[in-house]
Image: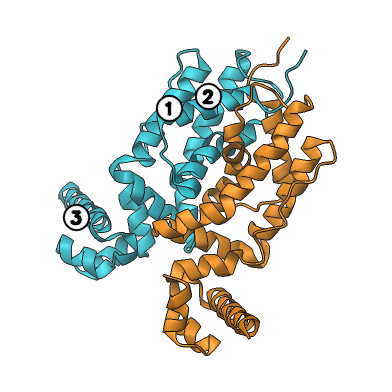
Chain colours: A orange, B cyan
Amino acid sequence: MADERTSRSDERAESIRRAALEIAREVGYPKLSIEGVAARAGVGKHTIYRRWPSRGALFLDAVLTGNDDGLDYPDTGDVVADLREQIHAAVDLLGSGPLGSLYRALIAEAQHDPSVLSALNERFIAPQAARTVARLERARDAGQISPDFDLDLAMAILSGPLYFQLLITGEPLTHRFVDRVVDALFTGLGPRRP
Amino acid sequence: MADERTSRSDERAESIRRAALEIAREVGYPKLSIEGVAARAGVGKHTIYRRWPSRGALFLDAVLTGNDDGLDYPDTGDVVADLREQIHAAVDLLGSGPLGSLYRALIAEAQHDPSVLSALNERFIAPQAARTVARLERARDAGQISPDFDLDLAMAILSGPLYFQLLITGEPLTHRFVDRVVDALFTGLGPRRP
């Protein structure tokens, strides 16, 4: 009985998330309203507010649910190949395709709503950063990356150029661009050592 | 007489920009309206629309006017010191202080309005990228950076981690963070060469 209630509640949550994504795709996030989502999902506004404190919180949950796992790094022993593969998967998911413009809208909302920014970090960015550092630590232990490289900066340095392309230049976030960035970061700016 | 007309028109434009910034600071960009700006500046809405096609275009011009020059790189001969100094100035201007949250709001608007994105690039990002590449080319010619580093990526790689901090983690964009990023980029991820 408790299970049945949970499962009905999960289904309702899923239909609310789906309604939010559909509406955001149709009219853009700025015009998404809790009223509109409630009407499309066939629930009352209070049902939505009981679970999500704001429009931004609902949108974040809708964009990330089902998409915030599965971005583990492979470990084939070749750190460059593994970084490329994982980052290709991440940009396929969030930098283009059906989620791409919604993810940009989510980041835009985070500039105005600090609770969306912190939820984005807790739920998505921090776990990604932890996975990135863990993979790079193994590479460092295997002598594949410089022991002088500041691993605490790994997420900002590896992801930053991709977010710059996604949010600032707006140019396509291709696998080729990812590969060039990874190569440039491995090369480093410093002069070729003798 | 023509000069007098120009100067009056410039003054009116400046008072419109100032009104837009004041209102954005007071209530946040999402609540900025052309009506509100017109009322505060004491002009008609058509006067605003004659010069700026949209709310986003006016906001971009208001944020950047008076702030989009003066970010030249020094050339003391020490490329690391010069990069640090220029990037410190850029983050003091746009990453914190009175313009910081307005610049974040501008980037958020660019996620929804492609004309704001392209204007941001033409007016601010592309000239910055050109200055960055020019300074790094001189450094390369002086043997201070690796000839293998892909200079076309310089802007994405140097600025990306800072935009990541500003827009994604929301952590403070300090001079110390800038210095750590510059050092890490010079070190590079690649293994220490023998």
- The residue positioned 63% from the left and 35% from the top of the image is B152
> In front of the other: label 2 or label 1?
1
Q: Amino acid at mark 2?
A: Arg
Taking depth in this image into account, of B79 and B31 the one nearest to the observer is B31
Question: Which residue corresponds to the image point at 63% horizontal and 86% vertical from the top-left?
Answer: A1
- Location of mark 3 (residue): B12
Residue B147, located in which quarter of the rendered image? top right
Q: Do the dots labelled 3 and 2 sit on one chain?
A: yes
Q: Residue furthest top?
A: A194
Q: Is residue B50 left or right of residue B143?
A: left
Residue beneath disc 2: B135
Which comes sooner in the sequence, label 2 or label 1? Answer: 1
Residues packed near mark 3 inside 10 Å, few (<14), some (14 to 19) or many (20 plus): some
Provide the chain ID for the residue under circle 3: B
Question: Mark 3 belongs to which amino acid?
Answer: Arg
* Secondary structure of the residue carrying numbered label 1: helix
- What's the chain of the residue with tag 2? B
Left/right placement of residue B114 relative to residue A193 reads: left
Secondary structure under tag 2 reads helix
Q: Are marks 1 and 3 in contact (CB under 8 Å)?
A: no
Pointer 1 residue = B86
Q: Quadrant of residue A114?
A: bottom left
Which dot, 3 or 2, sits closer to the camera? 2
Residue situated in front as seen by the camera: B115 or A35: A35
- Element carrying mark 3: helix
Quadrant (top left, top right, bottom left, bottom right) of the C terminus of chain A: top right
Q: Amino acid at mark 1?
A: Gln
Q: Find the distance from the CA under tag 2 to the CA under tag 1.
A: 11 Å
Compared to B154, does A174 lie above or below? below
Image height of B100 relative to B131, above or below: below
